[in-house]
Image (cartoon, grey):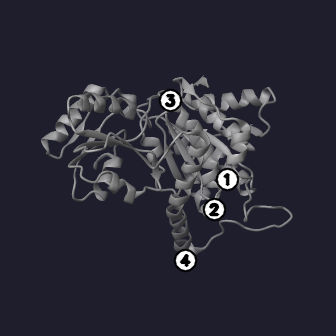
Amino acid sequence: MELLDGNQCAAWGARLARVQYVPCYPITPQTEIIETIAQWKADGEFKGLFEQVDSEHSVLSAALGSAATGARTFTASSSQGLLLAHEIFPNISGTRLPMVYVNVSRAVSAPISLWCDHSDVLSVRDFGWIMLVCETNQEVLDSVIMSYKISEDKKIVLPVLVNMDGFVHSFTREQVVIPKQKMVDKFIPKQDLKIKLDVRNPKSMAVPVLHGYMYFRSQVHRAMLDSVSVIKKVHSDWYKLTGRKYDFFEGYKLSGAKEVIVMMGSYTTIAKNAVDQLRKKGRKVGLLRIRVLRPFNEILFKKMLKGVKHVGVVDQSIAPGLSGILFSEVRGMLPSVKVSNYIGGLGGKDVSDKEFIEIFDDLKKGKEVRKWLM
């Protein structure tokens, strides 16, 4: 067990997974991930290829080429860097290439903010990537390792994005258990792609298909749906190996709850404190944290919220002119439940336990609302 920040945890996850190629480009607050791997490379502790390229667009382009040859690939970015690489995200999922990408969430300019919200990560939610959103640094490390086993599964073969909150995770240290290398080697099988680029057996990948395009998109969707069972199995295997349990969603004191907050990311920890305070006063409140954003396990989600009267979705994002992004998705899944929306934490603005308590007070009144936590 060591004191590690989230960036170091992401780097450790990649190292333990025996990543073979890390293309990189610095951007706050992700830079420490590549600095950590660069130091290991300089010290001879990292055996893979480490390469700084021209931009985040070049990073993901290089990652695509690497993954297409069957090399285990890892990279990371944040905010404007993720946006610059937008063009390549669907290329990787559409070519059915396994890899892991860590996004260290940061608000999107303008104006410029270095602090966290989820506008960057949610901009790629429909690009065909499996997406995990973390609450703790331990979860970041574990998720990177688990993601390789998910991504490289022969039934799936899709890339995975692991998200942490900038500065809250990336530069805050927590006690973290670093798994033994032998344990991770046992957990992740050797990658063996059936289709890959090979100079001894030339082939084309992701060629123009014109009217066949719809078929290939349907296959990405089918693989995403099929990944539900694979993710369940990987979570179960990791629990048996480490004793650390993960699921698609985390239910916090949902038993008997009538008012529930739905959210994701690091601010969940503060909201749990609010739940604890109200539970001590006899209030039937609870929280559901979204951990696996894609695929979204709608059946399990509805089951966990059965009997709840009013849901408050707390969004660290906004689709201007509509609502918070999670709110739109949650409301569509719960047509018979009252669903309110609270926009908070944009650009890293603090949301206190007092404000979460005020949300629960709102939900108790029974009227659907849409509010900004200013």
Cα–Cα span, label 3 and label 2: 32 Å
Q: Nearer the viewer, residue 162 or 242?
A: 242
Measuring from the top left, give residue 236's x and y in whole percent: 55, 50
Mark 3 or mark 2, earlier in chain? 2
Mark 3 or mark 1, earlier in chain? 1
Residue beneath the point at 70% across and 32% down: 37
Q: Contact (CB < 8 A) between labels 2 and 4?
A: no
- Secondary structure state at the residue bearing disc 2: loop
- Whether 80 is drawn above or below 309: the answer is above
Using the image, tell me which numbered label, if any, was put on residue 95.
2
Query: Label 1, on which residue?
Result: 64
Query: Label 4, on which residue?
Result: 211
Cα–Cα span, label 3 and label 1: 27 Å
Cα–Cα span, label 4 and label 1: 24 Å
Q: Nearer the viewer, residue 38 or 275?
A: 275
Residue 342: quarter of image = top left
